[in-house]
Image (cartoon, grey):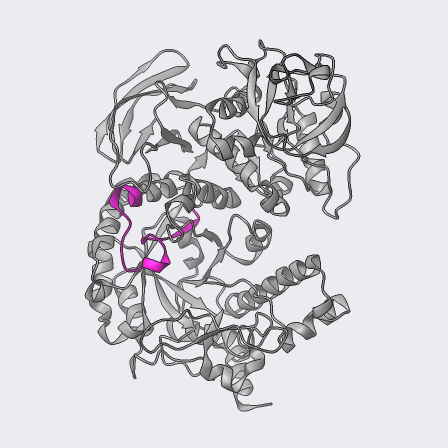
Amino acid sequence: MTKFYLIAMLSLFCFDQSIAQDKDNIQWWKEPHIFLQFNLQVKDAPYIDAEEIILYAKDTLQAEAIMLQTAGIYAWYPTEIPFHQKNPYMGDRDIFGALNAAAKKHGIKVLARTDWSKTTEDTYGHHPEWFVLDAEGKPHINTLERPNEFDRLILTDGNGPYRNEAVAMPAMQEIIKKYQPDAFFFSFAKYNPSFGPYSQQKFKKLFGKDLKDASLKEKKEFARISYYDTWKNWYKAIKESTPNTVLVGRSRLDQRETIEFMSQYCDVISTQPRDDYKDGWTMQDPRWKAAIETNYARAAHQNGERPLMLTNTAPGLKWRHTALPKGEFDFWTAQLIANGGNWLPSTTGFPAVMEDKTTLELVRDFNLQIKKIKPYLRNNLKEARVAVLNGYRNFKQAEDELNGFYETLINAQVQFDVLTEYNIIKDQLKDYDLMILPNQRVLSNEAVRVISAFAKAGGKTLATFETGLYDENGNVRPKAFFDDALGIKQRFQVVPNPVGAYYRIEDVAHPLFKNFGNTRLVPYGQEAIKTEGSAMPLMTLVPNFAPADKWGNPPERASFKKESTEFQLVYANNDHIYFPGRVGQFAWDHRLPISTLLLENAIKHLAPDCTPVTTINDEKVIVNIFKRGKGYLIFLVNNEGERPLPKAIVLRDVKLKWLTDKSIKSMQSVLWDKNISFEDKGKTIEFTIDELSTWDVIYAE
């Protein structure tokens, strides 16, 4: 055994079990906190004054918990672990130790940030086998071309010793022994594909063949297993010694399968909804992305705890040293709080080295607002009776379909949760009236069982396109769970995008077409499934220029006969609605109000009580309502204006109605310290917000 392995193993297994740590430390994260990260740059190490930085974080930025660079790419403390490279600019100083001590002195919780995804060429020179290698044995150099002298950083193999027993695990135990941080946060923990020897050996052991012969499915499964195994090692390194140290687990909208795992191997879920303009204005993320990601992360907890929402305060990492405009910054951040998250802003640098201090002003001002409402943020439970399933197996195929529904739900002020299959199976949909399944093509047999039981017990479902037609093993189901209830006998082939086609409304009196006006045609241009069923069609697919001898004269006014169900585009009753086409994707791609109205009408037809608080005059306001003890917390976020917003477009005299059978005695804006007058009209409370700039927070009891 080499010397560095001996040291690593001694550090790992001879750890002092008597480390002093508050036995209740594990509970601290369940309280709402004001978080902060100064994203430190290695060359700024000589300018760091720990006491000055921590006091600024506490007194000016109101921070109660701070995330600090600790280990990984570089150690920010004098590590004794071989090949754990120290920050070359800190000399003999202990930067993390000084900051950690100052934070604890002033009552601030510390999150130790580690990044084991890459390290320097020095380590690669000694152990190239620890790194991500391509099929030809070349390393993956992660660093962009940059001026001046910077180390070239190389990706580490997730199955190799660097991320596990040789460096990462003993280093984290070294950190615990020396500093007792309150939490660990892992950046860039995902597995990167590698042909290195450790990944090759592991793949062959798992799948019985060479990695070069792996199928796409096997590669994905291997990446998942490798990611989970590394997390388990980190969990062991930390929790077996200090079970009261909080582990923060990262997840993303397209990695929803990690929720079940993270629920077992971490204490709090985090995600990172960046307001990112790196690819230009036309490629910006949806304006409601922060709301959806927070909603998803919060639903994973289900007990009122607030997930940790990390955001970059810049318009993309390309320009990490500058700030978003105030209106955009405030709008994005308000969504995080209003959807039940704890906000963790990340600023690049600290006051002494920042040439653009606008970010610090923005963080300061918003944290002062959070401080005012913080007493109301504990144990809030979302008043949502509608759930949307985004299963990870369907993310790519269903992304735009989901986006169409998300935009509709938010603009219609529907209260909803974003769920994974894990949520569905664990909680059995017991808190919901309506389950929305936007092209959830692959559903596990267990998920179908739960959804079917939910429907039999009176739950409603709204599904589109290929929902439920495949199980988790890729087997085709002969029918979807809602087919019998809707009279669907069979499906035929998928019809390609019928360019220039329409829906023709065959039953104009149906609630699905409420407020459609004097029209029987709705534009449509996505795939659809041919179906056969016993129900009379509510809508049929009609081509634009059909053969004159088949469907009408002139052809551009063509229509199928009413008795034809071959191209029926909606099946509906009082319990289920099924659209055999991609109606959400069409609404998202084209933003035609009538397409969005069709989705909204479908949702409200099945869940008429899904919008307890709405604006009377249809102002663009994002609404969220939470139950808090005997009272209610209502968040209102101003959704007006074209992004990126230079400043909020102030809404005046915003009139709202709240459908409730509760006896409300008082309403107040806890954000702006003023009482709100209201009128009780019997099962409806009406009130007015005189001025809505970025947001408001109303407490009623």
Say above or below: 65 vs 116: above
* Residue 655 position (above or below residue 152): above
**Coordinates of residue 68 in the picture (x, y in percent):** 35, 65
Q: Is residue 642 left or right of residue 659?
A: left
Residue 410 among those drawn in magenta: no
Q: Position of residue 372 (x, y in %)?
A: 25, 41
Q: Image point 51% across, 53% down: which residue?
A: 251
Q: Is residue 312 magenta?
A: yes
State which quarter of the image contains the N terminus: bottom right
* Magenta-colored span: 306-330
Above or below, 360 against 90 in this view is above
Q: Residue at x 62, y 62 (%)?
A: 223
**Residue 324 point in image, percent of width and height:** 29, 49
- The answer to whether residue 160 shows anywhere in this view is yes
Q: Nearer the viewer, residue 365 or 25?
A: 365
Q: Nearer the viewer, residue 551 or 321?
A: 551
Q: Nearer the viewer, residue 513 or 553?
A: 553
Q: Nearer the viewer, residue 632 or 147?
A: 147
Above or below 700: residue 470: below
Q: Position of residue 373 (x, y in %)?
A: 29, 40
Asked where in the image residue 143 lies, by quadrant, the reply is bottom left
Rendered-image quadrant of the C terminus: top left
For residue 632, say whether it is visible.
no
The total number of labels drawn is 0
Q: Quadrant of residue 184?
A: bottom left
The image quadrant that residue 686 belongs to is top left
